[in-house]
Amino acid sequence: MDNFEHARIADFKNPFPAIDEGFYNLQIVNSEYSESVVGAASPWARYNLRLRIVNDNKFAGRVFFSNQFVGNAFINGLYKVSEATGLAQEDDQDLTQYVQAIIDAGESAVFKAKVSNEVDDYRSTTEETILDDGTIVPPQTVYKNEVKLSSAQVADPFVT
């Protein structure tokens, strides 16, 4: 399409649908920490991890994001990543510094973990939509990938 002025969203398919559910060798390539404002009624903190699939015939190089809310599951997951990669958190490192150390370790910090498909409520629709030109767009369920850090284990050996 050369002219996007009259583009219809319904004409575009997601070029990167969710990967198949299963266990993959993963590398954390980026992380962004965010938290609620001080005094919020429901305080939260999370890491938005950017993960890359490595050493997979079908999905090698694919990148996806996974929101990890800070809590027992995330801490347990990082412990499992630590066991799988051999990268322990140093006594003087906070969580953000430790996650950055995993990123900085590159391919020596690859681990294997379960990636699941979950419904993306933000991008999915539950009702059909009628466009201005009368075109009916049916409901659409869009899936996103989430990594279960608590399933982290030693990565499969790299195939050369």
Image (spheres, grey):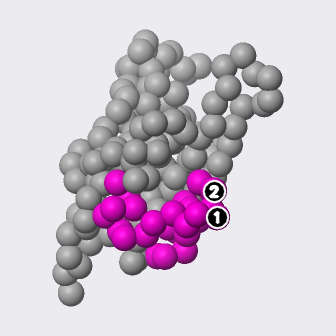
- Give the amino acid type for the residue marked by disc 1 in the picture: Asp
* In the image, residue 76 above or below residue 56: above
10 Å crowding of disc 2: few (<14), some (14-19), many (20+): few
Q: Which residue is mark 2?
A: 94
Residue 70 position in % (x across, y down): 55, 39
SS for tag 1? loop
Looking at the image, which residue is at 46% across and 25% down?
A: 121
- Residue range in magenta is 80-106
Q: Which residue is mark 1?
A: 92
Residue 86 among magenta residues: yes
135 vs 138, left or right, is right
* In the image, residue 64 above or below residue 118: below
Residue closest to the eye, 83 or 154: 83
Residue 82 position in % (x across, y down): 39, 61
Which secondary structure class fits the magenta region best?
helix
**Can the viewer see residue 136?**
no
**Can the viewer see residue 131?**
yes
Residue 113, image quadrant: bottom left
Residue 52, image quadrant: bottom left
Looking at the image, which residue is at 43% across and 12% down?
A: 127
- Give the amino acid type for the residue marked by disc 2 in the picture: Asp
Residue 76 position in % (x across, y down): 40, 45
Residue closest to the eye, 21 or 110: 110
